[in-house]
């Protein structure tokens, strides 16, 4: 059997698991998601106030651009919702990965002497 740094080549489980992981599997960037979600909600609130102002305006030209502000507001809200869903998926993936690592860990170095 070929030895690789004290590990036999017949048990590649540790290496396979290691190279399959990404940083998102170990720790999703929750603070970054929260920051971007906050930024998108702030932009949405700004567009909402512009929409309300334009919709209630006595100027016909301003009322005509109100739907544009509403569309932007809706777009920002949908992006914020997508980010929230993506974070939930990454958190679920992390949970699955942690369980997988706990399940596989005992077999990684079981062939080595203590």
Image (spheres, helix red, strand yellow):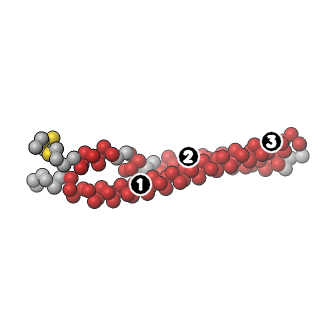
Label 2: which residue? 36
Task: Indicate the secondary structure of the residue bearing disc 1.
Answer: helix
Q: Residue at x 44, y 55 (%)?
A: 91
Residue 52 visible here: yes
Q: CA distance from mark 2 to mark 1?
A: 21 Å
Q: Residue at x 29, y 59 (%)?
A: 102
Q: Is residue 2 left or right of residue 24?
A: left
Residue 46 visible here: no
Q: CA distance from mark 3 to mark 1?
A: 42 Å
Viewport quadrant of the C terminus:
bottom left
Q: Residues within 10 Å of mark 3 (few under 14, many from 20)?
A: some
Label 1: which residue? 93
- State the mark number for residue 65: 3
Q: Position of residue 45 (x, y in %)?
A: 69, 49
Q: Position of residue 4 (x, y in %)?
A: 15, 41
Q: Residues within 10 Å of mark 1 (few under 14, many from 20)?
A: some
Q: Position of residue 14 (x, y in %)?
A: 24, 48
> Where is residue 72, by image quadrant?
top right
Task: Indicate the secondary structure of the residue bearing disc 2.
Answer: helix
């Amino acid at each position: 059997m070929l030895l690789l740094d004290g590990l036999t080549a017949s048990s590649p489980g540790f290496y396979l698991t290691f190279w399959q992981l990404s940083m998102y599997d170990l720790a999703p960037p929750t603070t970054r998601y929260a920051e971007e979600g906050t930024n998108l909600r702030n932009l949405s609130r700004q567009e909402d106030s512009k929409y309300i102002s334009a919709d209630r305006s006595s100027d016909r030209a301003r009322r005509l651009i109100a739907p544009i502000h509403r569309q932007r507001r809706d777009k920002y809200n949908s992006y914020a919702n997508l980010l929230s869903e993506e974070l939930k998926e990454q958190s679920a993936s992390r949970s699955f990965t942690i369980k997988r690592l706990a399940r596989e860990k005992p077999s990684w170095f079981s062939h080595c002497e203590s």
